[in-house]
Image (cartoon, rainbow, N blue to C red):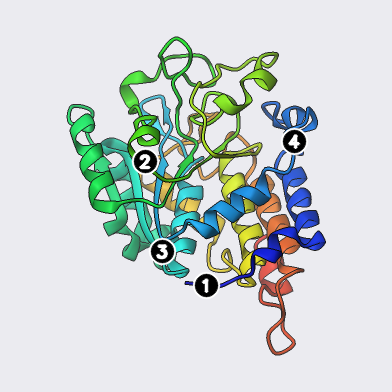
Amino acid sequence: MASYSLNIFRRPDTVHLANQIEGLLVAGNLRGMETVRSSGYRGYLLPAAQSLLQNRQRVAIVSGFPVAGQYETDGPAGAIAMARSLRALGSEVALLGIREYAEQLTGALPSAVSDGAALVDSVVAFDRETFSDELPRFIKTFAPTLIIFIEVPGSGADGHYRNMRFDPVDGATLPWEQLLSLAECPSLAIADGGNELGMGRLREQLQNLPVSCATATTDQLVIADVSNWGAYGLLGLASVCIRRPLLDEFVLTDCLEALVAAGMVDGVTGCNIATEDGLPLVRSQSIYAGIQALSSSLIPQRGGTPVISQTSFAARTA
């Protein structure tokens, strides 16, 4: 396990970096997240990074949002980035999903990242019919120390799971809220709208936005214009806290292309193309590169060479 000092979370440069990344994550205000942050929900990224690092021994990562009979690219890319980074730190990782989604994730992993084949065995698929029996067994066997939800549908006040168009998607997801009561460990959610599990924490701030607010809350909540971006931002900040780059071997385009090759789609357009939430790929690349640039500036150099070089930074913005 990588080591770090708790003082790092209180250092002015770390706090400033966290605020910079937060601002970058919601700058587009695509679904009102910048509005939410401006209303007072600031400073969420640093405690989320602290929880991630302090509770990273055995991490269960849930993802998979249904779109028109498929599953979207927003969520799994962030889940894969988180999983490979945590494994690099010595964590045990489990990637959880409903079976249809989990099978697509398994198909994408070998091409998504350089060590993706090693992550295939980390995928845990759940069936609707046996979920209530399978989940407690998983908790008992894996004994997670942290649960992360990335772009996961959350039940609303009416008990239904809905997409951004308010259509019910109950049959294509699972009641992942059960993890919160079954697992005695911290929880962290990454979301970009209001209908995702964990967003119940912002119910008051979301009441004037055109969203279907989920009711469940998590211990930590990271918001972003695109949920994947929240995962990248969290890893960028964590990199600085442990003085080790966690995104240096994650190539965004490779991951997205592997996901669509496995059958996943853009969550907004519904098209089988390597983009996130209807945005041009260059927009996602720019956010990703910006996170890398901000975090690499505070990671100590080795032998006079930045840990994340300007060459790799430029290559990923091309």
Viewer can see residue 283:
yes
Q: Residue 91 has which mark?
A: 3
Q: Are marks 4 and 3 in contact (CB under 8 Å)?
A: no
Q: Position of residue 281 (x, y in %)?
A: 62, 46
Left or right: 82 in relation to 315: left
The mark nearer the N terminus, 3 or 1, is 1
Q: Total marks drawn?
A: 4
Q: CA distance from mark 4 to mark 3?
A: 33 Å
Frontmost of labels 4 and 2 is 4
What is the secondary structure assignment of the residue under circle 4? loop
Frontmost of labels 1 and 4 is 1
Q: CA distance from mark 1 to mark 2?
A: 36 Å
The mark nearer the N terminus, 2 or 3, is 3
Q: CA distance from mark 3 to mark 1?
A: 10 Å
**Residue 172 appears in which quarter of the rendering?**
top left
Q: Position of residue 63 (x, y in %)?
A: 42, 40
Above-or-below relation of 226 to 53: above
Q: Which residue is mark 2?
A: 263
Q: Residues within 10 Å of mark 1 (few under 14, many from 20)?
A: few
What is the secondary structure assignment of the residue under circle 2? loop
Kindly identify the amino acid type of the residue bearing the numbered disc 2.
Gly
Q: CA distance from mark 1 to mark 4?
A: 34 Å
Q: Which residue is mark 1?
A: 2
